[in-house]
């Protein structure tokens, strides 16, 4: 893991987060997922948050993200979930109106793990790659490293 620097500090903090779609509806299509990757790049530019990988099945999204110590893990989750939901609803308004009855995109809460260097990171990546009912359902995208699919 790269040593990151901010004003007056340096840090190495990485989290594995899972965001679940409201009512466990299957709304994360390949098109929605591609759009989410673009949004995550924008989040990187505006916040001290750096995405390592993002994966999805139809009803949930996995994110491996590095965050600055200025943000708590729950704040990082809040930033990501709120911006992703707002932008998805803007680009795909039918999801909000027809699928979620004008409600929220994500379920309340989620899951957060801390992730270390080396073996721990590979274990999380393997988990994200292999979890779910069918390995082929999960799509994984790595932001700053070679694609895992090549392995």
Image (tube, rainbow, N blue to C red):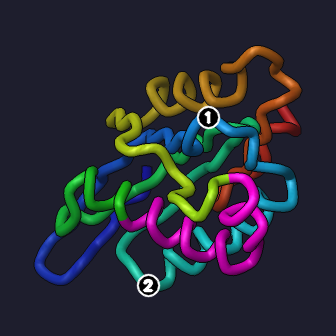
Could you tell me residue 38's position as x and y percent?
A: 70, 73
Is 7 part of what is drawn in magenta?
A: no
The answer to whether residue 45 is seen in the rendering is yes
Residue 124 lies, with reference to residue 39, above or below; the image says above
Could you tell me residue 112's position as x and y percent?
A: 36, 37
Residue depicted at 86% across the width and 52% down the height: 30
Residue at label 2? 46
Residue 44 lies, with reference to residue 76, above or below; the image says below
Quadrant of the rendered image containing residue 89: bottom right
Packing grade of label 1 (10 A; few <14, some 14-19, many >=20) is few
Quadrant of the rendered image containing residue 11: bottom left
Lower sequence index among marks 2 and 1: 1
Distance from Cα at disc 2 to Cα at disc 1: 29 Å
Q: Which residues are magenta?
A: 79-99
Q: Which tag is nearer the camera, tag 2 or tag 1?
A: 1
The answer to whether residue 115 is seen in the rendering is no
Residue depicted at 54% across the width and 47% down the height: 63
Position of 55 compared to 22: left or right?
Answer: right
* Residue situated in front as seen by the camera: 23 or 101: 101
**Which label is found at residue 24?**
1
Is 92 part of what is drawn in magenta?
A: yes
Packing grade of label 2 (10 A; few <14, some 14-19, many >=20) is few
Residue 50 lies, with reference to residue 126, above or below; the image says below
Position of 48 compared to 105: left or right?
Answer: left
Magenta: main secondary structure? helix
* Residue situated in front as seen by the camera: 34 or 146: 34
Residue reaching furthest left?
8
State the SS at label 2: helix
State the SS at label 1: helix
């Amino acid at each position: 893991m790269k040593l990151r620097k901010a004003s007056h500090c340096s840090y190495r903090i990485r989290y594995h987060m899972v965001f679940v779609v409201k009512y466990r509806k299957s709304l994360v299509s390949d098109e929605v997922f591609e759009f989410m990757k673009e949004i995550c790049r924008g989040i990187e530019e505006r916040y001290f948050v750096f995405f390592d990988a993002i994966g999805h099945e139809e009803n949930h999204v996995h994110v491996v993200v590095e965050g600055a110590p200025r943000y708590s893990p729950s704040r990082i989750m809040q930033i990501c979930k709120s911006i992703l939901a707002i932008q998805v609803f803007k680009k795909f308004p039918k999801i909000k109106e027809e699928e979620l009855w004008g409600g929220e995109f994500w379920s309340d809460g989620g899951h957060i793990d801390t992730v270390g260097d080396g073996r721990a990171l590979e274990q999380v990546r393997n988990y994200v790659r292999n979890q779910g009912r069918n390995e082929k359902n999960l799509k994984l995208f790595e932001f700053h490293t070679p694609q895992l699919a090549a392995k």
